[in-house]
Image: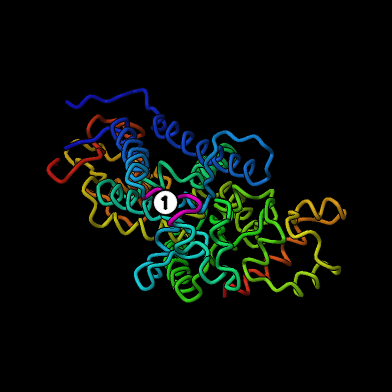
Amino acid sequence: MKLSAKALAVIIAVVLLGGIVLSNTLGWWNTSGGQGGSRGGSGQGQLQNIDNPAAGESHSEEQAAFDGSIRGKTTFQDLLEWGVPLENIETILGSPLPERSLQVSAYCQQQGLSFGRLKRSLQEEVDKIQR
Amino acid sequence: MKKIRFFRPRSIWVRSIVQLFFFALIALIVVNNTLIENQTGFSIWPRKASIHALCPFGGVVTLYQLVTTGQLVQKVHDSSVVLMGLVFLLAVLFGPVFCGWVCPLGTVQEWVSRMGRKRLRRKFNHLVPHRLDLVLRFGRYLVLAWVLYATAQSGRLVFQAYDPYFALFHFWTSEVAPTALLILGLTLGFSLLVERPWCKYACPYGALLGISNLFRVFSIRRIVRNCRSDGACGILCPMNIPVDNLEVVRDHQCISCLECTSEACCPVKDTVVFATGDVK
Ligand code: SF4
């Protein structure tokens, strides 16, 4: 049996895109949080604040989707909940912890700091916990 | 008397369209993800998907962890495992079509290579000494072994720090490691001299998918009785496979691009075909 390039193109598109649609219907297609992200993406189990187990229930979907990366919307509260010690955050900031609900990126903007640089230092702390 | 075409289409145009489609799709998803993460209040669609979630190789590196602990490696999601399954299915049937038709990094290398080909003409893609080339091509299996081992050991996506694919779609962010940027730069630079240098010498996923060439259902087959032995298929194969000396291509480097077939560079109809074993 011979196959032309056009037929192959159609098969590739159908298998990949159709496969995604089918897996989505079956509930297997998880690209951020839910089963995938929390199952392994992040080792979220290790990172949840054990002092406050209820905190996990009130998490927004984005927080539940935590995958070990500090992003623009990550707040200081998130860092604490992931298990980064307060002192370590304050040492990196070189000042007392600001309002917990403040986003790290917004804090950088307020203070005229480079988000990239601060993010790298904080990320190292998050990574240490995951290890 | 076999019909000989005087007009030789130089490439499989439908492949270029498929490549462009998947490149644009991934680029769009990455842009959308950035918009959502930066809380711009605007997104193309509301659902988030990081590039890790769309990489089937993520499914491969997480397999050990998934089987032994039921967990996925950090940053990998269920979608990667689904994609891994779909790409394996395609590979068993058609070989590494993911590399030749879908992978955006392969596509970008091909785009850059067009400039190199224009400058170097016949020398392009024939610069690396044959023996050295043969040895270097097994380098990607070493990379594969290291990535699988290091990921299984650490439970982390260690390859991200070296991954030119991640760097390609995140070069503007602080998430990209300098090593990944350097490797991306080298890959694009060498693409001016060699076709798909990353795929040939270093890609761990290409190494894994390449194994499917040994048993795939549809293969590149040269019908010897029709062949005029003009060598066009071998010269124009991007992966330098001597198709003109083979009856069935089982080379671990074939990417199923179909550029050697009678639909593309071979001037004689039904001489180099993509077919199952019953076509002789
Ligand atoms: S043998 Fe043919 S299909 Fe395989 S890589 Fe070379 S040109 Fe592409």
Residue B115, compared with residue A78, is above or below; it is above
Asked if residue B49 lies left or right of residue A7, the reply is right
Asked if residue B11 lies left or right of residue B185, the reply is left
User: SS at mark 1?
Assistant: helix
Residue A95 in percent (x, y) is at 86, 68
Residue in view at x 28 percent, y 46 percent: B94
Indicate the amino acid at tag 1. Ser
- The answer, for residue A52, to whether it is visible in the render is yes
Name the residue nearer the viewer: B23 or B71: B71
Question: Magenta stretch: dominant SS?
Answer: loop
Q: Which image quarter holds the N terminus of chain B? A: top left
Residue A101 in percent (x, y) is at 73, 56
Asked if residue B39 lies left or right of residue B86, the reply is right
Q: Which residue position holds label 1?
A: B79
Asked if residue A127 lies left or right of residue B157, the reply is right
Q: Give the quadrant of ligand 1.
A: top left
Residue B140, compared with residue B49, is above or below; it is below
Residue B228 in percent (x, y) is at 25, 36
Q: Residues within 10 Å of mark 1 (few under 14, many from 20)?
A: many
Residue A98, compared with residue B23, is above or below; it is below
Name the residue nearer the viewer: A14 or A5: A14
Residue in view at x 36 percent, y 73 percent: B68
Residue in view at x 75 percent, y 55 percent: A102
Residue B36 in percent (x, y) is at 62, 42
| Residue stretch rendered in magenta on the structure | A28-35
